[in-house]
């Protein structure tokens, strides 16, 4: 098994911290001052995702960006429950330890689904929601992949294919960008570093085993959050979570707004970080 490299250096003004969550070590980044803002990354990602937007967001908020357990450079235990509900509950327990009573949430993809679960579990503790292409039951993108990876045979085949997947990492990264020319140096290396550990992929497979039930819960959660102030951010070239599914979310969350970024893919905070930061800052600062 390949050993993981050290975590990438954080940008100036950002502190690398560690906490004990459910008996395991969780890494997180902290920066800024003011009301708390929690940033939740997507599947196969970690706090590295937010490196280009933390400086701007931390000028108005105290930013917390964890590597969720099973991801990044946090512990990757094989005996943990990896449903979105379990992840949301663990985050609330951690915030309790941090004496954070309420927070704004920014979640991307899988992290968007976890943010929705957090808000459904404790709506009184969530001020505003920012959801960047959040996973949801109405997106057709990747649906067949989720069905295959939920099976034992599919997961076994996927794990056997890891050498090929690692070798073609640049191809998969480019697919997440609307314009691959926007990929800055060090991006592939940064995202790939924690994925050298086989346990990272095994934890990802355990996330997929809960997918069907997670989607059922999210369908109810979006309905339950009809009164919550929220902002949806979607790149119109997203190939991971369908931009069309935003319409279904808006039907259930009438107080939500949608910001579509033209020519942008699945990870707008990495592709157009200045625009993404400004959109989020404007939304959080509005009354």
Image: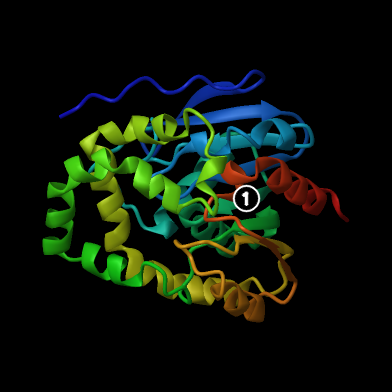
The structure residue drawn at horizontal position 50% and vertical position 60%, both measured from the top left corner, is 113
Determine whether, in the image, residue 122 is placed left or right of residue 74.
Answer: right
- Residue 22 lies in what quarter of the image? top left
Q: Estimate the x, y position of residue 38 in percent, counting from the top left.
A: 61, 43
Q: Residues within 10 Å of mark 1 (few under 14, many from 20)?
A: many
Q: Is residue 141 above or below residue 178?
A: below
The residue under label 1 is: 106
Q: Estimate the x, y position of residue 187 in percent, counting from the top left.
A: 47, 33
Instruction: Name the image quarter holding the C terminus.
Output: bottom right
Determine whether, in the image, residue 283 is placed left or right of residue 170.
Answer: right
The structure residue drawn at horizontal position 57% and vertical position 52%, both measured from the top left corner, is 107
Q: Estimate the x, y position of residue 127 in percent, counting from the top left.
A: 73, 55
Residue 33 visible in image? yes
Identity of the residue furthest to the front in this view? 181
Q: Estimate the x, y position of residue 123 in percent, counting from the top left.
A: 65, 62
Determine whether, in the image, residue 79 is placed left or right of residue 110.
Answer: left
SS at mark 1 in the image: strand
Instruction: Name the image quarter holding the N terminus.
Output: top left
Q: Is residue 75 above or below residue 159?
A: above
- Residue 86 lies in what quarter of the image? bottom left
Residue 150 visible in image? no
The colour scheme applied to this rendered structure is: rainbow
Q: How many marks?
A: 1
Q: Nearer the viewer, residue 230 or 188?
A: 188
Q: Is residue 203 above or below residue 256?
A: above
Determine whether, in the image, residue 139 is placed left or right of residue 123.
Answer: left
């Amino acid at each position: 098994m390949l050993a993981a490299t050290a975590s990438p250096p954080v940008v100036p003004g950002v502190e690398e911290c560690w906490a004990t969550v459910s008996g395991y070590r969780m890494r997180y980044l902290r920066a800024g001052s003011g009301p708390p803002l929690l940033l939740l990354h997507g599947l196969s990602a970690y706090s590295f995702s937010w490196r280009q937007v933390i400086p701007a967001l931390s000028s108005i908020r105290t930013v917390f960006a964890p590597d969720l357990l099973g991801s990044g450079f946090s512990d990757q235990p094989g005996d943990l429950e990896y449903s979105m509900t379990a992840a949301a509950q663990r985050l609330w327990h951690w915030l309790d330890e941090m004496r954070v009573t309420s927070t704004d949430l920014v979640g991307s993809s899988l992290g968007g689904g976890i943010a929705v679960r957090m808000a459904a579990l404790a709506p009184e503790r969530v001020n505003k929601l920012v959801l960047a292409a959040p996973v949801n039951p109405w997106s057709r993108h990747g649906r067949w992949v989720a069905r295959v990876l939920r099976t034992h045979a599919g997961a076994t085949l996927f794990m056997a294919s890891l050498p090929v997947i690692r070798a073609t990492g640049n191809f998969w990264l480019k697919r997440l960008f609307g314009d691959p020319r926007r990929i800055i140096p060090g991006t592939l290396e940064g995202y790939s570093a924690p994925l050298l550990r086989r346990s990272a992929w095994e934890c990802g497979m355990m996330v997929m085993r809960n997918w069907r039930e997670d989607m059922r819960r999210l369908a109810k959660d979006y309905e339950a959050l009809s009164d919550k102030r929220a902002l949806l951010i979607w790149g119109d070239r997203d190939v991971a979570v369908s931009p069309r599914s935003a319409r279904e979310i808006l039907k259930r969350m009438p107080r939500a707004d949608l910001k579509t970024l033209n020519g942008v893919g699945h990870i707008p905070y990495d592709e157009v970080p200045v625009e993404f930061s400004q959109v989020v800052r404007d939304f959080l600062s509005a009354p």
